Image (spheres, grey):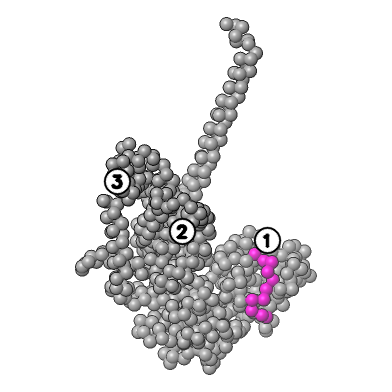
Amino acid sequence: MATVAQDPALQAIRAGVGRRKLFDAIFVIIGLLVMIAALAVLCVLFLDLVVQGAPRLNWDFLTSYASRKAENAGILAAWVGTSLIMVVTACVAMPVGVAAAVYLEEYAPKNWFTAIIEINVTNLAGVPSIIYGLLALGLFVYKFNLGQSIAAAGLTLALLILPIVIVATREAVRAVPRAIREAAYALGATRWEVTAHHVLPYSMGGVLTGMIIGLSRAIGETAPIITIGALSFIAFLPSPPVTAEFPFLSFAWLKDAFTAMPIQMFNWVSRPDPAFRVNAAAAGATLLGMTLLMNGIAIWLRFRFRKRINW
Amino acid sequence: MRLTSTFALIAAGFAAFAVAPGGAAAQSVIKIDGSSTVFPISEAVAEEFQIARRGKVRVTVGISGTGGGFKKFCRGETDISDASRPISTSEMEACAKAGIEYIELPVAYDALTVAVNPKNTWVDSITVAELKKMWEPAAQGKVTTWKQVNPKWPAQPLKLFGPGADSGTFDYFTEATVGKSKSSRGDFTASEDDNVLVQGVESDVNALAYFGYAYYAPNASKMKALRVVNSKGQAVGPSPQGVLDGSYEPLSRPIFIYVSKASAQRPEVKEFVEFYLQKGAPLVEEVKYVPLAKLAYDKALANFRAGKVGTAFGGHNEVGLTVEELLAREARF
């Protein structure tokens, strides 16, 4: 046995294996460090905002309007505005994005025309958001006469995140095994039935991931919202979506003027009185909280959809 | 299927939006937009007015800059435009073309403040000629040290901070010092966010910046405001007193609101503007601007009630004009 252990060739192999395992371990450490660094930056930012904004983070802050007095100012109009815009954005981007992705994946013939569309969808994801703002100002605000309204802002942000939703949905649709489709076809299902009953429900997890990324980007966008004319001071809420008389649902709020969280923060940061910076930090912490809440809901939905997959 | 019904619901929602009547409870909204300099005043007045009217009237205030505000105003999108400088010739034409008549009302004074770092020992007061030497376009790339402006000052680098070219403050300062609006050197640190200028002066001993008095007042302990030599040869520091008695010149300026004549027919707009001119003075003070004299507010109110349309400036900024003089002028349109 001693001779085997001293065999130079075997020793060389062992040394090689040892070296490669070392690289493996080094990579794990680097990966871990990078991840910790990224998370630490986020945590430090969040904690910094919370600590700075702590004196203002209370119920009054969420339920009062902006004011010239820093200690009375709140973010009611801003968070309601942001929430409503996100509702519009999600309601538009989700069906349109999913429909476009399903068409491209399941229906579209593979020719030069769809190739151009595909390239452009990917390119659109890289267009600066201010360009979407300018487009929306001309198209939604003036051409479609939506004015400086929640509907215009929601549609603008929907356009902005559409490429993200489409790309994510296509990936998810592509990940559904071919065998599932073929099995459904074999039982006589039409293409629509295959898509609606099998492909889409199974890819819902991926679609929701795309929505999470898209909406997280949209909620913090400032440039396009400023371009289409968000207001800086507004001390009333949009009309309520639920009314006392028939048909109980009202969509008048879509036409209302608005402000949004990033705008409110920007306004506070640029004011002369340093007390407003505390408010801006508190608003920042709230905005991060809103993003986390929104993502939490999407992750919970995704979990529920995944549970139902039983291949 | 469930998916199909989801789509149907969304489609129904949008259909409902399309036929929904524009604002079921049609509440009147007063729309204000324009200068970020005037914003704190309009915001304060809007806040108090809405409290006083118990939410029966809604007021919105936006920040598009003086120029951006006039663009919306002359398209008839807003009722009142905040302006930190008088309406320009091209804006007058745009309004005339759209048939928008306006009433020009001064609402407060702003004192442009020239500030340096508190550790700066060599300068306490400055003349307009020295400011011109620093800021004129010919100084670009040439005047780079304090000594070049005044031989008594040290040969230290000169770091300049100022508002960006879209700002009414920039327009007025260049007009008052260089002699021509928008005529300035380009190699200075420009920012639309005045807090950046404040930070520049706080952190650099060689810095010099100008911005509105509202940004100086809360930060007075962290910087030194220069006294500016006026036309009578007195060096006067920025203060409400100096602005009111006219001794802080040429860097004090009136700021305005422009009210659309058509909107002024609406009772709630009329009421709001009257509130602005009658109850505005303490609010102006609170947000660190200098209120006009009582008589000037009365005269402005009389002009408003008489529906005196047009501008007293004829499309040009003027330096060193008192509000009393401009209110007495025959307005042109």
- The kind of residue on which mark 2 rests is Leu
The dot on residue A189 is 3
* Closest to the observer, B162 or A307: A307
Q: Please state the horizontal and vertical placement of residue B93, each as a whole percent of the image.
A: 54, 85
Q: Is residue B16 magenta?
A: no
Residues behind callouts 3 and 2 on a single chain: yes
Please rate how many residues cluster around mark 3, counting C-alpha atoms within 10 Å: few if below 14, some from 14 to 19, many from 20. Answer: some
Mark 2 in CB contact with mark 1 (< 8 angstroms): no
Q: Please state the horizontal and vertical placement of residue B195, each as a whole percent of the image.
A: 56, 64
Q: Please, which chain is the residue tagged with disc 2 on?
A: A
Residue in view at x 69 percent, y 66 percent: B187
* Secondary structure found at label 1: loop
Look at the picture and state if A309 lies above or below A229: above
- Hey, which quadrant is residue A66 in on the image? bottom left
Question: Left or right: where does residue A41 sit relative to residue A299?
Answer: right
Q: Please, which chain is the residue tagged with disc 3 on?
A: A
Q: Please state the horizontal and vertical placement of residue A302, each as a whole percent of the image.
A: 35, 45
* Closest to the observer, A107 or B39: A107
* Magenta residue span: B179-189
* Closest to the observer, A131 or A26: A131
- The kind of residue on which mark 1 rests is Val
